[in-house]
Amino acid sequence: MITVTDLTKRYARHTAVDHISFEVHKGQIVGFLGPNGAGKTTTMRMLTCFLPPTSGNATVAGFDVLEQSFEVKKRIGYLPETPPLYPEMRTAEYLQFVGSLKGLAKAELAKRVDYVCERCAILDVKDKLLGKLSKGYRQRVGLAQAIIHNPDVLILDEPTSGLDPKQINETRELIKSLAGDHTILLSTHILPEVEQTCEQVIIINKGKLVATDSVSNLQNRARGAESLLVEVGARNGLMDPLKVQSSLELVPGVSRVHLKNKLDNRSIFEVESRKGLVRGDLARAVVEAGWDLNELRPTAVSLEEIFLQLTGEPAAAPAEEAVPAGVK
Amino acid sequence: MRNVWIICRKELRSYFVSPVAYILLAMFAVIFGFFFWNILGYFVFRGMESQMRGQMMPMNVNEEVIRPLLSNVSVIGLFLIPMITMRLFAEEKRTGTIELLATSPVSDVEVILGKWLSAMVLYASMLLLTAINFLFIFRYGHPDWKPLVIGYLGLLLQAGALLAIGTFISTLTKNQIIAGAATFGVCLLLWVLEWVSGYETATWARVLSYMSVITHFESFAKGLLDAKDAIFYVTLIFFGLFLTARSMESLRWRS
Ligand SMILES: Nc1ncnc2c1ncn2[C@@H]1O[C@H](COP(=O)(O)OP(=O)(O)OP(=O)(O)O)[C@@H](O)[C@H]1O
Ligand SMILES: [Mg+2]
């Protein structure tokens, strides 16, 4: 549905988007991920025909964004970074204006306005001035505006920015529910959002494509192995963490044991193992040696870590330091 | 064509929902009213004066009331036109709504025409207010109505040209105040260019004076429809709108 090849955008001094290529297939929700200034907005503006690319090309729904921009514009719904609202208009009036701008016939218009108002939960502000809406409602009206003409492709630039947690969840659900009929590309720098809503991720940093893969593949890719958090307690009296460590290391399949935190009568280890069936053996080893197994859980590699690894930010050290503090 | 109308209607709505339109209409009505009663008062005074002297000088309402009034309207217009056009594009650029227009299936030309037309409609409704004052003259006198119609046509053409230039200037900045001030400067310059013809007759002075929007209004104020002058205004309208289109295009390539 969206094909991007070698897309580049140079501003006067620096290159905001540098030869990126990716594809988005029909019906997918794809997360477009990157830190501030990565070039997400710039890329989306090129896809929506707002900015012409410096070089390379992109097609949306089979039409070139430069040569056939009119056809592209008919088929996309776009929510820019700041929702494009006219403060002196009322919600319903505004949606009617956008609808007719997108070419909806008069007969259809009223029906569509009612439909998107219901879909985006803005029925109660239908007659309010847009300038007086709260940030969350502005965002929702922006979303309603993007889907008013039932476009094939939705391009959403940080659709959940500035919303409260409840609204974030509602918006994510809304976006997910739209996925069936629309192809969606949404940008964000909030990682859980991608994990929850998207099937596919495209990560860019400083204008360059860093990774493009499905969410689950990316999670696996970061660490080939599974990592477990094991907390062992002493049943009576003291226990020697080093002894525990060496006995854990003896469990078949375990590749590395790392003592993360040592307290009076319990110790916390991070155990790395080949993927699979080591948990039972680990538990048995602990219990048979006469200790208590307080906790045993996989530490899912979060997208956060992958993201930080891929974008080359100082990642691992502070993240690991943070964990024990939380465990106490 | 449908898109032009959609944009135009939207602009008119924002003019008339916000106080902008009403302030402009009120200002125009008050200033024009003041001019009107002044000129009329002077006319009546002269009429009585000549009666007292016992001479019956022929007095012509068209020549002595309508013509100076129309010239005055064109001058008031110079001051109000920047206030009409300054927000047209600057505001859309500032709030980011330009992104909606630019990513919708409408062409730049349609957007520009829609916005310019809405400015024309607002200006025309201001003129309509002045027409009420003229009705008063028709009630008590018998002026010729044809020169009046031609005068109004001239006012519309002149405003159209300046509004097109104002629209263009509005695309150059995100700041309404800057757009308004620059438009005012350009309008004023296009007006005073005519002054050079007062003391200089060389070619450059004639060219400058020709460029003045006031020079071309004289025939309209007299009630004469001169094709040369009409063509001047129409050309200026096209030129202004053309520059606007180019500016919008380069806006994309530059940013
Ligand atoms: N009009 C412009 N002129 C010059 N440089 C620009 C312009 N717009 C963006 N840039 C630069 O291009 C780079 C990418 O900007 P962009 O807005 O695409 O980032 P982003 O990924 O959307 O960031 P964010 O997460 O903060 O929204 C930035 O370094 C920015 O400074
Ligand atoms: Mg951005």
Image (cartoon, coloured by chain):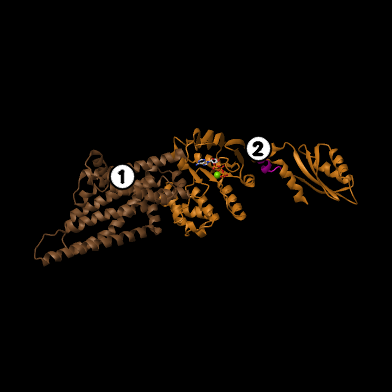
Q: Is residue B4 visible?
A: no
Pointer 2: residues within 10 angstroms few (<14), some, or many (20+)? Answer: some
The amino acid sitting under disc 1 is Ile
Secondary element at image label 1: helix
Residue at position x 45%, y 40% in the image: B252
Horizontal arrangement in the rendering, residue A29 relative to residue B151 (left or right): right
Q: What secondary structure is found at the residue carrying circle 2? A: helix
Q: Locate residue A307: give its quadrant.
A: top right
Residue that numbered label 2 is attached to = A310
Q: Give the quadrant of residue A179.
A: top right
- Tell me the crowding category of disc 1: few under 14, some 14 to 19, or many 20 or more residues within 10 angstroms, Cα based: many
Q: Quadrant of residue A25?
A: top right
Seen from the viewer's position, the closer of residues B172 and A178 is: B172
Q: Position of residue A308 (x, y in %)?
A: 66, 40
Residue stretch in magenta: A299-308
Q: Which residue occupies the foreground of this view, B164 or A215?
A: B164
Chain that the image shows in orange: A
Quote the CA–CA distance across marks 1 and 2: 55 Å
Residue corresponding to mark 1: B237
- The outermost residue toward the bottom is B52
- Left or right: A202 in relation to A86: right
Instruction: Please tell me whether residue B60 is drawn above or below residue A27 in the rendered image.
Output: below
Q: Residue at x 91, y 51 (%)?
A: A237
